Image: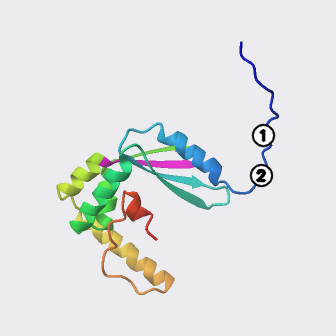
C-alpha cells in the first residue's frame, strides 16, 4: 500500500529570465549526442537577439581542453578552427534553437595530423577581419585571430 500526502501545484511566476528554461533545453539536447562531443547551442530570441550556450557530453570537457592545448601549441588559428570544425560539425535545429555538434575525436585527429585551412578561405577571413575593423573604426589586424576553442578552459576564458 502506498500512502502519501497531496501537495499543491507549484506556482510559476514569470521572471523575464529565460536561462533556467534554456538550461533545461540544453540538458535535454545533450542526451541526443554521443560522448566526447562539444555542442554550440544558439537560442534565437523573437527580438532578433541570441544567446549561445556551450555544452559537452561525457568526456568532452577533457578532450576539448586537450584539443585546444595541442591546437594552440601547433600554432593553429581561427581559419583552421573554422575549417576543421566544418569537417566535423553536425547541424540541426529545434524551432528557434540552432545546434552545432562537434565530434571531438575527429577534431583532435585533424589537429594532430596538421590539417590546416585552405589559403583561399584564410584570405577570405583576413578580408572579413579587415573590413570589420574598418567599419568599427578599429585598427585592422594583420594577424589571423587565434584558435577559438572547443574546450571549456579556452571558450570560457574572459
Displayed quadrant of residue 94: top right
Occupied quadrant, residue 128 = bottom left
Q: Give the range drawn in magenta.
A: 96-104
Which of the two residues, 28 or 40, is positioned nearer the viewer here? 28
Residue pictured at 43% horizontal, 68% vertical: 157
Foreground of the two, 82 or 37? 37
User: Residue 93: percent from the left, percent from the top?
Assistant: 52, 44
Residue 38, horizontal then vertical, whole percent:
40, 50
Q: Please tell me whether residue 152 belongs to the stretch shown in magenta.
A: no
Q: Can residue 96 be seen in this view?
A: no
Q: From the viewer's perspective, tell me whether residue 52 is left or right of residue 18.
A: left
Query: In the rendered image, which residue does mark 2 sit on?
Result: 14
| Label at residue 69 | none
On the image, the x and y values in percent for residue 60 come to 37, 48
Secondary element at image label 2? loop
Q: In the rendered view, tell whether residue 156 sits above or below residue 84.
A: below
In percent of the image, x 76 and y 23: which residue is there?
4
Is residue 123 left or right of 12 when viewed as pictured? left
Amino acid at each position: 500500500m502506498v500512502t502519501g500526502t497531496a501537495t499543491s501545484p507549484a506556482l510559476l511566476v514569470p521572471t523575464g529570465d529565460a536561462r533556467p528554461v534554456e538550461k533545461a533545453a540544453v540538458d535535454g539536447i545533450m542526451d541526443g549526442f554521443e560522448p566526447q562531443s562539444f555542442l554550440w547551442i544558439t537560442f534565437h530570441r523573437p527580438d532578433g537577439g541570441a544567446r549561445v550556450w556551450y555544452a559537452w557530453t561525457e568526456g568532452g570537457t577533457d578532450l576539448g581542453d586537450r584539443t585546444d592545448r595541442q591546437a594552440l601549441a601547433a600554432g593553429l588559428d581561427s581559419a583552421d578552427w573554422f575549417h576543421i570544425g566544418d569537417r566535423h560539425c553536425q547541424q540541426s535545429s529545434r524551432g528557434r534553437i540552432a545546434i552545432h555538434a562537434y565530434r571531438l575525436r575527429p577534431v583532435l585527429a585533424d589537429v594532430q595530423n596538421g590539417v590546416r585551412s585552405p589559403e583561399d578561405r584564410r584570405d577570405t577571413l583576413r578580408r572579413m577581419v579587415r573590413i570589420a575593423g574598418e567599419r568599427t573604426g578599429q585598427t585592422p589586424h594583420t594577424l589571423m585571430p587565434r584558435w577559438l576553442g572547443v574546450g571549456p578552459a579556452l571558450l570560457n576564458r574572459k
